[in-house]
Image: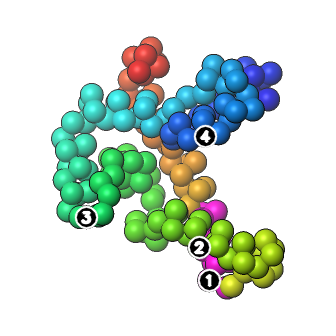
Amino acid sequence: KAETEQRIIIAWSTHELDFLSESHPNIEEYYLNANKLVMKFFRDNRKRTIKKIKAKIDEEKLFMKRKPGLKDLLQLDYVDYNYPKAFYGFSPSKEITRVRKQLTNKSGLYKNLSRGAKVALGKMIKYNEHDCMGMKHLIEYVFSRKPTEDVISY
């Protein structure tokens, strides 16, 4: 549909691109990696912010280091996005694993999931909505501060 309508598919990483490229070999022509675009803008124009985010990540002392991401940027005051506090420590991968495990053990039916798994699934849907709306907000933020040709040339 994106190809037919000359539209762009926007995602926060290349995970979606890798998945879609199996069935749509020329998908790269219609794909924009928002992470690459937004992070380049912040690295070029908000170096101190990136350093602060990295320091905060270091303080988390997680088993695996992570890079600054969408959630970190959406929580910045000057980005002006109302990011729900309920998602600050939320781990989508943990909840996906939980729901998948139950679906495997409970005949793959939603009605058989525990109340906790249903709540987790509902929270995942809300989390994903904020991922999409937040990504859109950050792209608009970047484009409102840089000429289009500077942003697209990432």
- Find the distance from the CA under tag 4 to the CA under tag 2: 22 Å
Amino acid type, label 3: Glu
Q: Position of residue 127 (x, y in %)?
A: 56, 61
Label 3 belongs to which residue?
A: 60
Q: Position of residue 45 (x, y in %)?
A: 26, 30
Q: Earlier in the sequence, mark 3 or mark 2?
A: 3
Looking at the picture, tell me which residue is in the foreground, 9 or 98.
Answer: 98
User: Residue 116 bears which disc, if any?
Assistant: 1
Report if residue 147 is visible in the image. Answer: no
Q: Earlier in the sequence, mark 4 or mark 3?
A: 4
Callout 2: helix, strand or loop?
Answer: helix
- Find the distance from the CA under tag 4 to the CA under tag 3: 28 Å
147 versus 87 height, above or below? above
Amino acid type, label 1: Gly
Instruction: Please tell me how crowded label 2 is: few (under 14), some (14-19), or many (20+) other residues with Cα within 10 Å.
Output: some
Label 4 belongs to which residue?
A: 16
- Asked if labels 1 and 2 touch by Cβ distance under 8 angstroms, the answer is yes
Which one is closest to the eye, mark 3 or mark 2? 2
- Find the distance from the CA under tag 4 to the CA under tag 1: 28 Å
User: Residue 98 bears which disc, if any?
Assistant: 2
Which one is closest to the eye, mark 2 or mark 1? 2
Please tell me which residue is depicted at 41% across the width and 21% down the height of the picture.
154
Q: Earlier in the sequence, mark 2 or mark 1?
A: 2
